[in-house]
Image (tube, grey):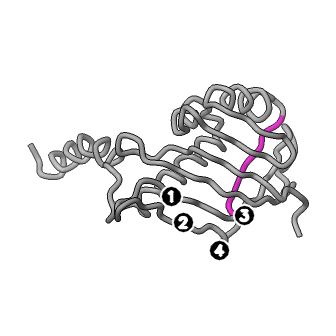
Amino acid sequence: MKPALIAALLATLVAPVTAAAQVTNENWEASLRQFDSAYWKAFNDCEVQKMTMMNSEDLEFYHDIGGKMRGRQAFAEATNRNICGKPDWRLRRQDVPGTVQFYPLKSNGAVYGAVIVGEHYFYHLNKGQPERLEGRARFAHTLLIKNGQWQVARVLSFDHGPVK
């Protein structure tokens, strides 16, 4: 077998293990950034089941317009109904460059979670029309580590309004 083929096969076998690497004090920020990127890709692609499983069972979501929501299943149902259930309309989220910040949460020196704060833009795409920037909002997410993996536990989504 050629060395390049062996390397490719090994990379294929190791990739899933790497993606599910345990969060540690040394890799918390890199793993959180990777998780956050995957979370928002799932949101933008309407991969509701994937995004739902990235949330904690007892998810709490507080929205300054839509109100409060509790539980992973309620979040999935609302996302399916309000964001991903409209065939002629789509919503895309993008962080505002330079605004997103990551902070570890520690207990006895060990990272057990993190907070992500920042701002994001929302783009609407109506079928047959170009995408357009519709609004801007602030967010604060608390993530916890469960079984060595990140989960979104608490979400604050606020200060929704037009782009300034």
Give whichever of 55, 89 is nearer the camera.
55
User: Marks 1 and 3, Cα distance to the nearest angstrom?
Assistant: 17 Å
Q: Which residues are magenta?
A: 89-95
Q: Position of residue 81 (x, y in %)?
A: 77, 27
Task: Check the image and report above or below for 63 versus 84.
Answer: below
User: Marks 1 and 4, Cα distance to the nearest angstrom?
Assistant: 18 Å
Q: Residues within 10 Å of mark 3 (few under 14, many from 20)?
A: many
Give whichever of 111, 87 is nearer the camera.
111
Q: Tell me the mark number nearer the camera, choosing from 2 and 4.
A: 2
Q: Quadrant of the N terminus?
A: top left
Counting residues from the start of the chain, the first of labels 1 and 4 encountered is 4
Left or right: where 141 falls relative to 86:
left
Give whichever of 42, 75 is nearer the camera.
75
Instruction: Check contact, mark 2 vs mark 1: CB within 8 A.
Output: yes
Q: Magenta stretch: dominant SS?
A: strand
Residue that mark 4 sits on: 98
Asked where in the image residue 153 lies, by quadrant, the reply is top right
Q: Secondary structure at mark 3?
A: strand
Q: Residues within 10 Å of mark 4 (few under 14, many from 20)?
A: few
Q: Secondary structure at mark 1?
A: strand
Left or right: where 28 falls relative to 63:
left
Residue that mark 1 sits on: 114
Residue that mark 3 sits on: 119
